[in-house]
Image (cartoon, rainbow, N blue to C red):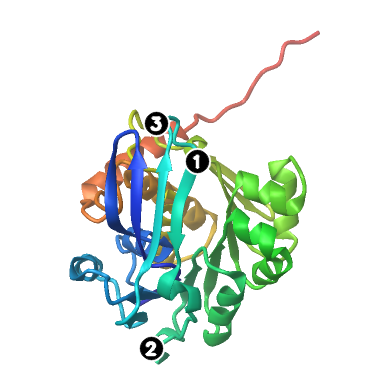
Amino acid sequence: MNLLIVGSVATDTIETPHGSVDHAVGGSAVYASVAGSYFSNPGIVGVVGGDFQRKNINLLKRRGIDLEGLQTIKDGLTFHWSGYYEKDMGQAFTRETHLNVFESFRPDLPESYKDVPFVLLGNIHPALQLDVLSQINKPKLVLCDTMNYWITSAPELLKKVFRKVDIICINDGEACQLCETNSIPVAAQQLLKLGAKRVIIKLGAHGVLLFGKDSFFALPAIPLTKVIDPTGAGDSFAGGFMGCLSSSKKLDETAYRRATVAGTTLASYCVQSFSCRKTSSLKEEDINKRAQLLVEATKLPKLRFTTKKR
């Protein structure tokens, strides 16, 4: 195992204009680990109840995901979220949230996980993210994902996490909210000053921005004609990104850009079906074909303009 992923393991009941699912497997750790499994050997730390179906365990095992860190509370129920999307599917609306066993979840890392080189801190309470970091021995690279709820409820604790990680993954609205600015570049610079090597700012259907202290990279989203369910797209991006990075021989600018393409590719497949139905059954040629679309979209000839003399 070379990639540790900590986050929620859940079942989701979701309705979109294109259909619905009832108690489908979900959660940040699930989406991220399935996406990351195409490039790395991930293991997850999370918790489920006795109701978590065997078929979900089998799905994760088929993807080669290490489950030693997945706790099972036999007399408890798995975290369940129920929600829906309206026509533009730009926002999820919650009907019900039942934290169940996740409410008292405390990450307890197996000894075999404590020397893992790459770590993805999924979208969980910042206090739990700090707890995980305290149990790991000198990780090579740590990415932290978050959401607006933690920005509102625990901003200082979240900044404490950001000061300890190498990569911050956040969407545009969250970045501007946390940094109290309307400018994405200003927000990125403020986040970099906390100590991160890179800041990823997700733009949803408009792509992603990757900021370094002396670098900038913009990647468009895959132009999909039909989106079935956006749930888990951000987690799939993070998992694909970190999975690709963990397989890189050198963590240079090229590696970060390749990882951004990998994450965007996996996220594009995630939204084309409910749950992990699409991302759990891809072939190598599927990933490479779609990644090549992004390569072609960002390819420019060498440019030198001759300006008109006045």
Q: Which residue is mark 3?
A: 223
Separation (CA) of disc 1 from disc 2 = 39 Å
Name which of mark 1 and mark 2 comes first in the sequence: 1
Q: Which residue is mark 2?
A: 112
Which residue is at 68% across, 52% downward?
A: 214
Q: CA distance from mark 1 to mark 3?
A: 19 Å
The secondary element bearing badge 2 is classed as: helix
Q: Give residue 122's position: percent from left, percent from top.
A: 49, 65
Q: Amino acid at mark 1?
A: Gln
First in sequence: mark 3 vs mark 2: 2
From the top left corner, tell me how far across and down residue 216 is, in percent: 62, 46
Disc number placed over residue 91 in the picture, else none: 1
Residue at image point 52% right, 75% down: 140
Q: In terms of image quadrants, where is residue 53?
A: bottom left
Q: Nearer the viewer, mark 1 or mark 2?
A: 1
In three-dimensional space, the C-alpha distance between marks 3 and 2, rounded to whole angstroms, equals 41 Å
